């Protein structure tokens, strides 16, 4: 127990030092997101080191838990290598995109190649059987390889699209971490990661730092590997449809954007100002209220899940609220 409190104190101090010294850090590591008056409407260049801070914390957390022999608080050996490798590869793809503004197809290709590489090294990551909570039988995948590639690519883009307004993705990810902690799934690992996200959230709220594509892709890798690991090794406390419910708002918004862009004959990954948070902000004209509405809608399905409500009901209810919110906000915006 003393080792756990020691680690919590160390990571609290480490991230606090980053917070109070961040102005010095960003001047030495000169990676900024510059406004372009189109999609990027912030007033000044903002540091893109959010992903870097998460990745450094991830490395240090895994190293520390291994050092103190807290193996029951971390993934098994193969999954530990998986989460380090995929998180690093996804972060590098995102960081290069942040710096060089990669072509959409190249970016997608690099993400897919990263997943293929991890599957090749660790074939046990593949899900060959999926369980649905309200059905009595298991579904076997004959194309699990392609399913894994598609799932990680879509998750990466869903998280990236969800990261369009300060705090939204950080708070949503923190909420998912808290679900893992409450359920007793690797609680020490996620408590230490949560400490990082708290201080990162402060910097993000102050508009001093963005996650960037690197940070969003990194988060998707952590969540993706975690969902698979718990499914295979932790008594399936989250089944296939339940994972979807947790991610339902980012998933629905991504699907809606893909459909609209394809109808308009645009690339499905080409950015625009039609995300849920953009639509809500045009109505509220208030950042904090927009974040509150978006996060409440994103978290509410998980609360219903914890109340043991059937996932098909949660899906139908959430979809109805999501559509109604968009229609209402657009109608009120036009009126005023």
Image: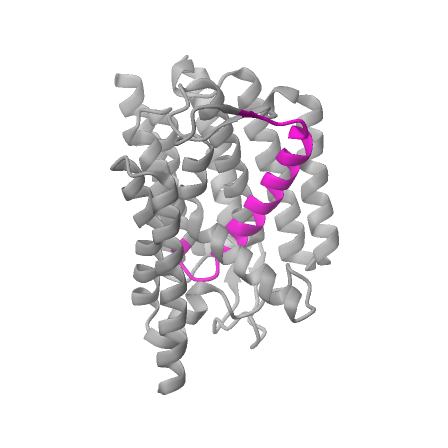
In this image, 139 relative to 329: left or right?
Answer: right
Quarter of the image containing the C terminus?
bottom left
Instruction: Report x, y in % for residue 147.
Output: 63, 35
Number of marks drawn: 0
Instruction: Report x, y in % for residue 83.
Output: 55, 29
Extreme residue toward the bottom, this view: 336
Going 58% across and 56% down the picture, which residue do you hit? 30
Can the viewer see residue 48 in this picture? no
Going 51% across and 69% down the picture, which residue do you hit? 274
Give the camera-side residue of 168 and 275: 275
Q: Main secondary structure of the magenta part?
A: helix
Instruction: Report x, y in % for residue 101.
Output: 68, 60
Colouring style: one colour
In this image, 139 relative to 177: left or right?
Answer: right
Quarter of the image containing the N terminus?
top left
Q: State whether residue 239 is above or below residue 298.
A: above
Looking at the rendering, the stretch of residues picked out in magenta corresponds to 139-168
* Residue 147 is inside the magenta segment: yes
Image quarter of residue 263: bottom right
Going 49% across and 24% down the picture, which residue do you hit? 229
Q: State whether residue 206 is above or below residue 314.
A: below
Going 50% across and 63% down the picture, which residue do you hit? 46
Extreme residue toward the front, this view: 136
Q: State whether residue 15 is above or below residue 212.
A: above
Can the viewer see residue 235 in this picture? yes
Instruction: Report x, y in % for residue 35.
Output: 55, 71
């Amino acid at each position: 127990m003393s080792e756990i409190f020691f680690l919590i104190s160390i990571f609290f101090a480490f991230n606090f030092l980053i917070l109070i010294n961040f102005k010095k850090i960003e001047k030495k590591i000169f990676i900024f997101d510059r406004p372009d008056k189109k999609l990027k409407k912030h007033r000044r260049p903002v540091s893109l080191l959010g992903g870097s801070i998460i990745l450094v914390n991830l490395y240090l957390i895994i190293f520390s838990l291994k050092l103190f022999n807290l193996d029951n608080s971390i993934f098994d050996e193969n999954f530990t290598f998986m989460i380090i490798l995929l998180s690093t590869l996804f972060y590098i793809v995102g960081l290069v995109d942040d710096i060089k503004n990669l072509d959409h197809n190249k970016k997608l290709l690099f993400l897919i190649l990263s997943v293929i590489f991890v599957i090749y090294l660790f074939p046990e990551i593949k899900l060959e059987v999926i369980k649905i909570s309200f059905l009595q039988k298991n579904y076997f995948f004959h194309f699990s390889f392609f399913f894994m590639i598609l799932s990680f690519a879509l998750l990466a883009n869903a998280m990236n699209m969800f990261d369009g307004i300060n705090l939204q993705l950080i708070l949503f990810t923190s909420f998912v971490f808290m679900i893992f902690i409450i359920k007793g799934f690797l609680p020490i690992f996620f408590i230490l990661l949560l400490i990082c996200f708290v201080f990162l959230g402060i910097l993000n709220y102050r508009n001093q730092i963005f996650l960037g594509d690197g940070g969003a892709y990194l988060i998707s890798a952590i969540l993706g590997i975690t969902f698979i690991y718990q499914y295979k090794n932790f008594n399936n406390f989250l089944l296939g449809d339940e994972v979807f419910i947790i991610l339902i708002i980012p998933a629905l918004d991504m699907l809606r954007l893909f459909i609209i862009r394809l109808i308009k004959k645009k690339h499905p990954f080409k950015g625009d100002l039609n995300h849920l948070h953009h639509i809500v902000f045009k109505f509220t004209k208030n950042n904090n209220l927009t974040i509150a509405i978006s996060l409440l809608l994103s978290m509410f399905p998980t609360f219903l899940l914890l109340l043991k409500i059937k996932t098909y009901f949660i899906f139908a209810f959430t979809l109805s609220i999501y559509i109604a919110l968009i229609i209402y906000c657009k109608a009120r915006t036009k009126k005023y």
